[in-house]
């Protein structure tokens, strides 16, 4: 299942300079800068929170670390108050117009750019439009940083995760600056949540500075999860609390962590693109420096594309439960980006408000590129670098080109009247479905059509080969040592039957020879096809074979790959696979059945 979102960029700016102690004098402006329906007309909506409003916000934030302090009506009151600040007049009008474009399959994604240090501390994740909290209505709220240049393709599926856990003071809790927690239980909970995700992981517990740096700069991780304490001191910067060899606190500044992450980008092909900081106040940014907070600094200097961080202190149990829920939702099978996984995991907090504490910092473009990257991951493709060729068998008067050319046939049979080189219509339709799929990650004019017997001239990284001789093509390219066909097609051994043998499962599938009955009779009967993916790291090539006993099955294999690649991604990830499909008689493929089971 793909993610579809209607993204609104909401910008919040400050209209006048005031001292920190005179915040009640400040005036602000809200404006929808971008949406599929354009910007909100006019300069925007100006608002000025009252002293009572600011006092209420400060009190709410001070109680956020308490697990069961709030009743639902308290949180609703906050959400409605901050919603009413910014959504008025033309801003509300444009917001409602966008809501009218939503469907069951398309949700709202509110990307907030906050250009005032006074507004950063406000927990916008609790926005309530009078009908419900946006985050609890299937929508997304993310924070973006206007000072950063926009990136393309910010998401790709997480493959390798570093889990770092720091618990300083556990050996001497009476003299510790931070309260210790049950790090072992949390580690077990995270490991349990990762079981069915397809994500490889490594645990660093305890998290000591030298080891942490070595893992980040020298290993092949693309995501970081840190569990431990964090602090933010106004006019300084955010810090993570590691531990030293003696279990004492070791303060790691955001700037240094960002340098490690940036260095990792230069040293390895897979870099850390995403960070989840399960640490108090790692999203805070109270100073005049936009990038003083840990999350903001990692976005600026660390080269990451998204960060989940805590905008205040958070109760430990709730924070750990949300994190575990996040990784459970990150299953490749579910096809979820970090944004959607966090939205679904927020319900794991177990109280009325902790779900709103985590904040997601990212870029304006997000889920759409995640979809592209998931498909590229399934294809083992490198965006912008891989090349794609579709190899289709050609015929002369009903015989394969290479065989017919030897016979120099010149007289048409009763079935085939065009004496030139032709393509099978069903093969071509199957190829069109593959082109529709590939055009999501590469311009369609860069996908090339070739004859099946032209493989010796081709240097494509990705080959899509159609027809029952596709495995012979791969065998001729890779050689018998590097590839042994799993599937064998036989059209002659058994009179009146065409058979497919699955050598791995030792199973034989067959259909009646369609040439021995009228065409309309073949269309009414079942047909059998296979899709096989072969990855040759030695040759730097990936092969997709789409073959059928009859041409209707070859056609169905293209349809199945286009319609069900996400299911195959969930089952196989980016590894090779082979599946057998039964296509029931008729002209549709919705009742296709998998036969590749022991």
Image: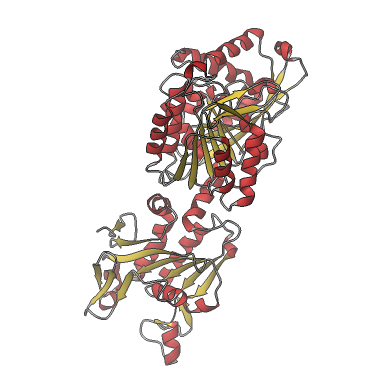
Farthest residue to the right: give it.
17
Image label count: 0
Indicate whether 9 appears above or below 23: below
**Residue 488 in sight:** yes
**Which sits in the foreground, 142 or 279?**
279
Q: Residue at x 52, y 19 (%)?
A: 176
Indicate whether 217 appears above or below 464: above
Q: Which residue is drawn at 55% across and 31% down?
A: 244
The coloring applied to the image is secondary structure
**Which sits in the foreground, 597 or 98?**
597
**Which sits in the foreground, 253 or 245?**
245
Residue 426 drawn at (x, y percent): 41, 69
Residue 331 drawn at (x, y percent): 42, 43
Farthest residue to the front: give it.
246
**Which sits in the foreground, 254 or 172?**
172
Indicate whether 586 appears above or below 157: below
Left-right relation of 76 to 516: right
Residue 382 drawn at (x, y percent): 56, 57
Viewport quadrant of the N terminus: top left
Residue 280 drawn at (x, y percent): 55, 24
**Residue 302 in sight:** no
Farthest residue to the top: give it.
52
Farthest residue to the left: give it.
495
Viewport quadrant of the C terminus: bottom left
């Amino acid at each position: 299942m793909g993610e579809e979102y209607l993204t609104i960029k909401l910008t919040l700016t400050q209209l006048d300079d005031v001292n920190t102690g005179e915040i009640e004098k400040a005036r602000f402006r809200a404006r929808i800068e971008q949406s599929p329906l354009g910007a909100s007309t006019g300069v925007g909506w100006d608002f000025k929170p009252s002293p009572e409003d600011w006092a209420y916000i400060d009190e709410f934030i001070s109680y956020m670390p308490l697990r069961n302090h709030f009743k639902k009506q308290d949180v609703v009151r906050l959400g409605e108050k901050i919603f009413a600040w910014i959504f008025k007049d033309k801003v509300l009008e444009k917001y409602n117009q966008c809501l009218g474009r939503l469907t069951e399959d398309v949700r709202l994604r509110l990307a907030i750019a906050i250009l005032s240090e006074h507004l950063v501390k406000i927990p916008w994740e609790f926005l309530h439009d009078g009908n419900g909290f946006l985050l609890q209505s299937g929508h997304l709220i993310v924070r973006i940083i206007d000072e950063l240049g926009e990136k393309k393709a910010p998401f790709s599926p997480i493959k390798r995760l570093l889990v770092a856990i720091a618990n300083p003071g556990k050996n001497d809790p009476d003299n510790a600056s931070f309260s210790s927690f049950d790090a072992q239980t949390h580690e077990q909970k995270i490991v349990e949540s990762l079981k069915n995700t397809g994500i490889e992981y490594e645990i660093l517990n305890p998290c000591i500075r030298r080891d942490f740096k070595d893992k980040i700069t020298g290993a092949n991780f693309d995501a970081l999860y840190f569990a431990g304490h964090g602090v933010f001191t106004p006019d300084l910067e955010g810090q993570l609390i590691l531990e030293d060899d003696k279990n004492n606190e070791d303060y790691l500044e955001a700037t240094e962590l960002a340098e490690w992450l940036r260095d990792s980008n230069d040293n390895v092909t897979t870099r850390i693109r995403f960070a989840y900081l399960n640490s108090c106040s790692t999203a805070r940014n109270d100073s005049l420096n936009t990038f003083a907070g840990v999350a903001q600094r990692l976005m600026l200097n660390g080269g990451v594309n998204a960060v989940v961080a805590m905008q205040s202190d958070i109760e430990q149990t709730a924070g750990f439960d949300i994190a575990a829920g996040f990784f459970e939702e990150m299953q490749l099978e579910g096809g979820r980006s970090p944004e959607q996984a966090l939205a679904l995991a927020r319900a794991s907090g177990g109280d009325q408000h902790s779900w709103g504490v985590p904040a997601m910092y990212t870029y304006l473009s997000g889920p759409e590129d995640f979809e592209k990257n998931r498909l590229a991951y399934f294809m083992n493709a490198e965006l912008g670098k891989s090349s794609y060729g579709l190899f289709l068998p050609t015929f002369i008067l009903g015989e394969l080109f290479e065989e017919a050319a030897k016979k120099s046939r010149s007289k048409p049979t009763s079935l085939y009247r065009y004496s030139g080189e032709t393509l099978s219509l069903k093969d071509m339709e199957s190829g069109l479905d593959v082109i529709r799929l590939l055009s999501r990650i590469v311009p369609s004019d860069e996908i090339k059509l070739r004859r099946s017997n032209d493989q010796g001239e081709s240097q494509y990284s990705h080959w899509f080969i159609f027809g029952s001789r596709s495995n012979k093509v791969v065998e001729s390219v890779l050689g018998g040592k590097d590839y042994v066909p799993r599937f064998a097609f036989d059209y002659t051994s058994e009179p009146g039957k065409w058979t497919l043998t699955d050598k791995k499962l030792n199973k034989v599938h067959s259909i009646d020879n369609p040439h021995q009955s009228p065409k309309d009779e073949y269309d009414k009967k079942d047909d059998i096809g296979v899709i096989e993916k072969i990855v040759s790291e030695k040759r730097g090539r990936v092969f997709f074979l789409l073959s059928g006993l009859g041409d209707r099955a070859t056609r169905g294999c293209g349809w199945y790959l286009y319609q069900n690649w996400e299911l195959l991604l969930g089952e196989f990830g980016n590894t090779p696979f082979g599946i057998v499909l039964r296509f029931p008689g008729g002209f549709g493929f919705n009742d296709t059945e998998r036969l590749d089971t022991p």
